[in-house]
Every structure is written in C-alpha cells, then in structure tokens.
Image (tube, rainbow, N blue to C red):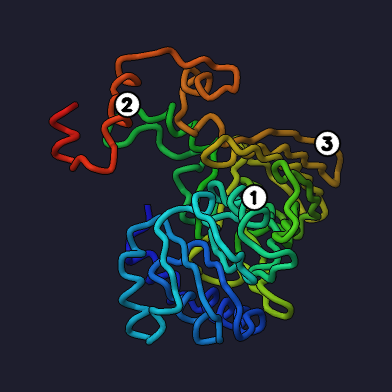
Amino acid sequence: MYELDDYFAMIEDGVRTPAYLEAMARTIRPGDRVLELGTGFGFFAVHACRLGAAHVVAVEPNDAIAHARAVAEANGCADRITFVQGVGERIALAPRADVLVEDLRGISPLHGARLDVLRDAQARLLVPGARRVPLADELMLAPAELPHDLGRLAPDAPPTVQGIDVAPVRALLRRTIHRTRAEPSVLLADGRAWARLDLGALPPGDPEGAAEFTVARDGRCAGFVSWFATQLAEGVRFDSGPATGRTVYDRAFLPLEQPVDVGAGDVVAVHVRTRFDGSDHVWVWDVEVRARAGGVTRQRGSNLAARAMSAARRARRAAAHVPPRTAALDRVGRLVGLVDGARSLDAIAEAL
C-alpha cells in the first residue's frame, strides 16, 4: 500500500511529472470533462483544471485522496473536481469523460488489474474517440548480468544468514521477479520491445510476445532487465530504462535459475507469456541462448512458485470450485443483513 510520501515522490520525479504535464497540455481542451484514475492527492487533477477542463472526476483507492480537496482548494479549483475514493470499475459517469488521464503502472505496465480497469473505462466511462494520457506502453527487455543490488541471487551467495540455513528460500528467489535499480553497465545488449499495449484499444487476454538479442560483449547472462517505454501524447515520450536513471518506477529483473556465460555475437531469444490471476500477472519466460561457436542452452523462468500461494489456495480460485457453507460465511450473511442504513457500527457489533 502506498504511503503519502510515495505519492509525493511520484510528483517530484523529474522524468515522469514534466512529461505528464506536457502531454496533458497537448491533450486537454477547454471545456473537456476529464477522468483521472489514480489521482493520489490530486496533483494532475488540479493541472487539468488549469488547462481549462470544465470538470474532473478524480478516482483514487488510497487514503491519500483525503488530502486532495485541500490541494484543490489551495489552487482555487475545488468546485471543478469531484474526488471519489475507490476503483474505476465501481464508479459511473454521466455524461462520460472526453479525456482519460491515468498512471496505474507499478514496476510494470501490467501492475495489478490495470488492463482490466482500462478496458472497463473504455467501455463504460469514456465517450467514443476519447483522448487519453498515455496512448501506449511498450514492454522492454534486455539480457543482463546480475545487477549490483541483487547480490542475494548470486549462485555463490551464502546458504545461511546468521547461521540459519535459508537455501530453500534463496532457491525460490532465483525463480521470481525482483525490483532493481539496474545500471546501463549490466546490459549485454540493447533493449527491445516484446509487447506493445495500445491503451485505447486493448484486446482481450494477456500480453505475450518474443524478442531476440545479439550479445554485444562477453559476460555472464543472469537474466533480463525489464522496463517500459511510454508514449503519453503525440511527441511526448519517456522510458523507465537504465539509461534514464532513477525514476519512481525502477526496473524489474527476470532471473535465470542458472546464469549462462555468453560472448559477443551470441544470440539470446526470449518468449514471454503473462496470465492475470485475479490480483496480478503470472509471468513465464522461456529463454534460448545460441552460442556463436555452436551449442544451445534453454531455460524456463516463472514467478509462479514464489507467489507464496499454496496448491490448496490456487484450487479455491478455480472457476469450478464450489465453496462450502461455513460458520464464517453465515456470519458474513448476518452482517450484510444488519447493515441497513440505520444501525451504527456499535449497534451492528452488539447484534453480531
């Protein structure tokens, strides 16, 4: 869960914020109705008003929105912004919005349920042909040596911490996705896009794609650095890759369970599949390293095993699962019946 300080760090980001402000200036027209998903404490909502928006509906699930009205009042536009605490799928708009502004990304454009939220907004909350910021995201990868801040993934990392054997968990760490501040020096080839998200016409299903790289120098390929490049508006772009430096997004690292020594001219191919499980995406990356001197190495990586979800819990998420009736569910049913718009929390608790 984001804290207020996290939201302030987002607007202080010298890459992200100037680009968003410029894109909004190129997109929003006087008299527009604007929908912002993920408003935080209302910074971009106020900017939309400064650009002439007739009204802004600003949506945010986090309690940071409690400070948004004060920000709007301090900037003289509180009467033109409706703040809604919640998520986009639970709101209705009449009339619909002319412009959508959002940044629901995390470390990746596939953060949480972002794609489903955007599909829902397109279907229910926006006018046909609505303008949007951003327009598209590209998902980028590059083969890389182990970033300096991920030494815990090194094959020679000690199996114990303070004398306690942690080898089983350390093995799992090499089979999941990690946040990193990876520098350009760890890359073994230039980055390439493996998928593109046209945010105004998202197809059903989950992103899947492939990329192929020619290794530029000798090194040890420990996995892939992952980032995104975004087109916010015509002529306004930025990316969160290593060459950009520090941003609030950082980068992700998709490790190989067994690092592979590579040389200049070798080819590294990767095929990435993602599947949304109801809360976030499961990633699978199939890797093939073709040595220039001959020989092929293949590996598969995935973040599934480290999602800390037991087999029994996964089974309970299956579409065919039949939930048993339990005392806990009976209590939930009684609770729903007691919430009648008249009883206070004290009275409900006493009745339960």
Residue indicated by mark 3: 295
Seen at 53% across and 19% down, the residue is 315
Residue at mark 3 to residue at mark 2: CA–CA distance = 60 Å
- Measured in 3D between alpha carbons, the distance from the residue under mark 1 to the one under mark 2, in whole angstroms, is 45 Å
Q: Amino acid at mark 3?
A: Gly
- Name the element at disc 3: loop
Q: Position of residue 316 (x, y in %)?
A: 50, 20
Q: Which residue is mark 2?
A: 332
Left or right side of 70 for 143: right
Provide residue 206's location: percent of width, then percent of height: 69, 42
Q: Earlier in the sequence, mark 3 or mark 1?
A: 1
Q: Amino acid at mark 2?
A: Val
Amino acid identity at mark 1: Phe
Return the mark for residue 320.
Answer: none
Q: Quadrant of residue 152?
A: top left
Of residue 97 and residue 298, the one placed in the foreground of this image is 97
Earlier-in-chain disc, 3 versus 2: 3
Q: Name the quadrant of the C terminus.
A: top left
Residue 99 at x, y percent in the picture? 63, 71
Q: Single out the mark in the foreground, 3 or 2.
A: 2
The residue depicted at 61 percent of the width and 68 percent of the height is 97
> Helix or strand or loop: what does disc 1 sit on?
strand
Residue in the picture at 77% in, 39% down: 288
Q: Position of residue 71 (x, y in %)?
A: 34, 78
Q: Is residue 116 visible?
A: yes
Residue drawn where x is 57% and y is 76% of the image: 20
- The residue to which callout 1 is attached is 224
Q: Is residue 185 above or below residue 73?
A: above
Q: Residues within 10 Å of mark 2 (few under 14, many from 20)?
A: few
